[in-house]
Image (cartoon, grey):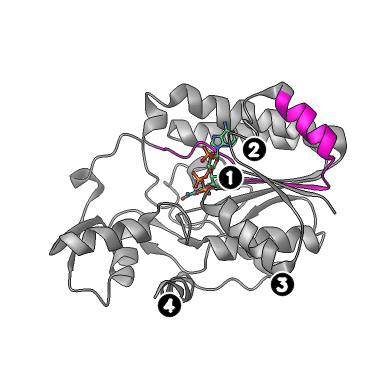
């Protein structure tokens, strides 16, 4: 088995490397310097010579707000053209491609959970780019998994948990948006899921994977900081304007992933385990 990870130094890529190390699975991990996915020729020759069985495509442009203006072109180059390069090369060598997508492919107006076949309607540039990536993967690759996730946190890189903890060190009171609802996702759960679907050779297609349960950012912050001496106060999205549109209600239905027999911890349990490992 030859395994390739793109974006191997990102939040998910780093967690995946750690998990594969534990499983004693060999892999080749690349960052943007070793393999710039926007360079079609480089991607083609790298993947042709490596001839991987599985590609975990974790590389992405994830600066959601920057993608609205100064990062607009990079968002397109990395998330659309970069994914096209990876998809073409994956198909060329007959590899299984795991592409990570996002809840931002939905507009967040649905009050119930988003099912996999619900109509997509991205409202920001990043969401448009990731959805284009999904379409490219479906069009070009025979053996593909598209895994949509949301609100990712974990040991590696910057994320909401670390931001809240850092701010709590220097503030008596934090205000956090209470009218956007979603499902936090621990990178460990996501890494376990994407290796599970590959190892178990489950049916190709699109899956949703986040931790179970749901919350607002305000509730998430409260849980993160419940043992800290800091007041967390709710504010509305209008009080906290951001460049990129954020879905109000981006809770994705997890039933297809659960039906595989994969046990999905609740976000509270995942967060508790993660925080206990940090101590
Ligand atoms: N973070 C979230 O909340 C979230 C939510 C939903 C979906 N997702 C998706 O989950 C996946 C993993 O996200 P993440 O949070 O792990 O992202 P991340 O921490 O931002 O990592 C992304 C990695 O992509 C690499 N990359 C960027 N441009 C590249 C290029 N041109 N060529 C090669 N590599 C490049 C970066 O490598 P360098 O450091 O070398 O530049 C970076 O390490 C992505 O597909 C993302 O869209 C994330």
| Residue drawn at 31 percent across, 66 percent down | 219
**Span highlighted in magenta in the image:** 42-64
Which of the numbered marks, if any, corresponds to residue 276? 4
Separation (CA) of disc 3 from disc 1: 22 Å
Residue 56 among magenta residues: yes
In the picture, the quarter occupied by the C terminus is bottom left
> Is the Cβ of the residue at disc 1 closer than 8 Å to that at disc 2?
yes
Q: Nearer the viewer, residue 148 or 1?
A: 1
Q: Residue at x 52, y 66 (%)?
A: 211
Which residue position holds label 2? 134
Secondary structure beneath disc 3?
loop
The image quarter containing residue 59 is: top right
The residue carrying mark 3 is 261
Q: Earlier in the sequence, mark 2 or mark 4?
A: 2
Disc 4 within 8 angstroms of ligand 1 (CB)? no
Q: Nearer the viewer, mark 4 or mark 1?
A: 4
Residue 101 numbered mark, or none: 1
* Dot 1 or dot 2, earlier in sequence: 1
Residue 21, x across and y down, in percent = 68, 63
């Amino acid at each position: 088995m030859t395994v390739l990870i793109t974006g191997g130094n990102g939040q998910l890529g780093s967690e995946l490397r750690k998990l594969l190390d534990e499983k004693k699975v060999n892999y080749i991990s690349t960052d943007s310097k070793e393999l710039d996915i926007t360079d079609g020729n480089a991607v083609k020759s790298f993947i042709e010579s490596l001839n991987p069985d599985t590609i975990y495509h974790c590389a992405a442009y994830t600066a959601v707000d920057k993608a609205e203006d100064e990062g607009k072109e990079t968002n397109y180059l990395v998330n659309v053209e970069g994914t096209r390069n990876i998809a073409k090369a994956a198909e060329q060598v007959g590899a299984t491609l795991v592409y990570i997508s996002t809840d931002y492919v939905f507009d967040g107006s649905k009050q119930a959970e988003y099912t996999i076949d619900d109509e997509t309607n991205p409202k920001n540039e990043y969401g448009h780019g990731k959805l284009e990536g999904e379409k490219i993967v479906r069009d070009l690759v025979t053996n593909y998994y598209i895994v949509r996730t949301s609100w990712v946190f974990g040991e590696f890189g910057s994320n909401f948990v670390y931001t809240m903890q850092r701010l709590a060190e220097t503030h008596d009171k934090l205000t956090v948006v209470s009218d956007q609802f979603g499902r936090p996702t621990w990178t460990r759960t996501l890494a376990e899921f994407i290796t599970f679907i590959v190892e178990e050779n489950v049916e190709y297609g699109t899956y949703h994977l986040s931790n179970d349960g749901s919350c607002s950012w305000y509730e998430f912050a409260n849980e993160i900081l419940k043992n800290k001496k800091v007041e967390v106060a709710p504010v509305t999205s209008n009080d906290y304007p951001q460049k990129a549109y954020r879905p109000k209600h981006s809770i994705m239905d997890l039933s297809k992933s659960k039906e595989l027999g994969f046990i999905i911890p609740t976000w509270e349990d995942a967060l508790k385990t993660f925080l206990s490992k940090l101590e």
